[in-house]
Amino acid sequence: MCQARIWVRAKGEEREVARDITQLEVKGDTIIIKTFFETPKEIKGKIKEIDFLKAKVILEADEFPE
């Protein structure tokens, strides 16, 4: 089984911000990402692209999450 990785595009850059994502939920302009053992993380932005073969989700945001 292969969990997804989350990348964020912001300010002309692209950075990986999370690994081993088991669930992704969209609530308005907020993306909630969950893993097996960590607290869910919220990112303001939108889904730009999903590559199922690479298990890669690219989000577009104004700023990178902390």
Image (cartoon, grey):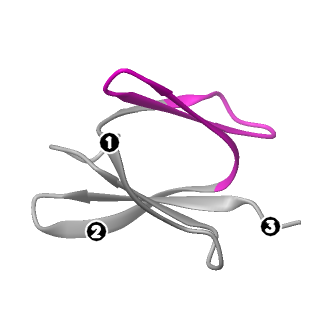
Q: Count of labels shown?
A: 3
Which residue was labeled with disc 2?
14
Is residue 27 located in the magenta-colored stretch of the structure?
yes
Question: Hey, what amino acid is under mark 1?
Answer: Lys
- Residue 46, which numbered label? 1
Q: Within 10 Å of the Cα at label 1, are there few (<14), some (14-19), or many (20+) other Cα atoms?
A: some
Mark 3 element type: loop
- Residue at x 81% of width, y 40% of height: 36
Q: Amino acid at mark 3?
A: Cys
**Which range is magenta?**
20-41
Distance from Cα at disc 1 to Cα at disc 2: 14 Å
Name the secondary structure under disc 2.
strand
Q: Is residue 43 left or right of residue 10?
A: right
| Residue lying farthest to the left in this orientation | 11
- Label 3 – label 2 distance at C-alpha: 22 Å
Residue 53 lies, with reference to residue 42, above or below; the image says below
Residue 2 got which mark? Answer: 3
Question: Is 47 situated above or below 38?
Answer: below
Residue 53, given in percent of the width and then of the height, sits at 65, 78
Q: Is residue 17 left or right of residue 5?
A: left
User: Which of labels 1 and 2 is toward the front?
Assistant: 1
